[in-house]
Amino acid sequence: VLQPVFALGMALLFHRLIQKGNDNNSWTFAKTWSVALLALCIHLFLDCMTTFGTQIFLHFSDFRVALPAMYIIDLTLTLPLLAVLVLLLRRAGKPGGDGLRVRLARGALLWLACYPLAALALNHAAATSLETRYAFPGNERGITRVELSPEPFAPLNWKVVGIAPDSYHMGRFLLTKPGGDIRFSRYDRVNPALWSALRADVPAFSMFADFATSPYQKDI
């Protein structure tokens, strides 16, 4: 909500530095602010596309937006961007390189938008298929819904969470073996009264609970 204000602060900090490399003074303060705002919006968008998400409406609401499309450090997203960055740096200052650099930058922005959305669509398709296989009426585990969370090396590797009224059933789904049988491990869902009490009594736990997914309890 406050991103335009934060972008203004970034523009005030960096505009003079950017102008030093702009010989014809064509780079305006409005452009600096626009780029800063775009960078902040991309950052929020990518945060929202992870399992844990982010609370984008603070300080007006603690609602967490989380669309489980990417792992926290997603190599499939990051490595192509690093390759583009290397190419941009190598072409800097070379004759006729500006047009290529612009095309590379636009391609990187397109990748930033398209990859998370494609991964989210893959998540939905895989979860729908797994629900057909494991959440059918009368299944022995009592699973009523299936969710997927990206793991390291996603989108090839996903954590599967089969949700039952009193338990979670967790396993692994590999995109390389879409028809493979899921080996589930059962975990008791956390007691709702205990969870609420801990949130009310322990401030640090409340912060953890805001981002916890599929919390379960285990006797020691």
Image (cartoon, grey):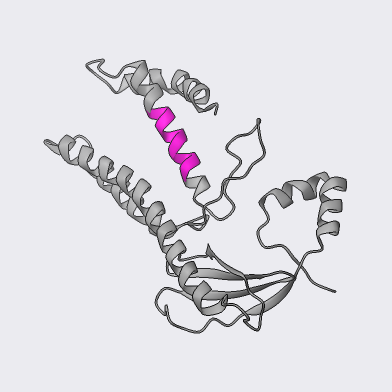
Residue 180 painted magenta = no
Quadrant of the rendered structure where residue 215 is? Answer: bottom right
Give left or right: position of 180 versus 189. left
Seen in the picture, residue 114 relative to 98 is either above or below; the reply is below
Q: How many marks?
A: 0
Please provide percent x and percent y for residue 111. 32, 49
Seen in the picture, residue 97 relative to 205 is either above or below; the reply is above
Quadrant of the rendered structure where residue 64 is? Answer: top right
Q: Is residue 14 visible?
A: yes
Our reading of the magenta stretch's main secondary structure is: helix
Seen in the picture, residue 63 relative to 150 is either above or below; the reply is above
Foreground pick, 176 / 147: 147
Give left or right: position of 115 versus 191. left
Foreground pick, 157 / 25: 157
Q: Residue furthest front?
A: 137
Quadrant of the rendered structure where residue 14 is? Answer: top left
Q: Is residue 78 visible?
A: no
Q: Please give the name of the residue rendered at 42% of the width and 28% of the height, measured from the top-left corner.
A: 36
Q: Quadrant of the C terminus?
A: bottom right
Foreground pick, 145 / 112: 145
Give left or right: position of 115 versus 212. left
Seen in the picture, residue 219 relative to 27 is either above or below; the reply is below
Give left or right: position of 140 versus 21. right
Q: What segment carries the magenta color?
A: 35-45
Q: Residue furthest left?
A: 96
Q: Please give the name of the residue rendered at 68% of the width and 55% of the height, measured from the top-left corner.
A: 212
Please provide percent x and percent y for residue 110. 30, 45
Q: Please give the name of the residue rendered at 39% of the width and 20% of the height, measured from the top-left corner.
A: 15
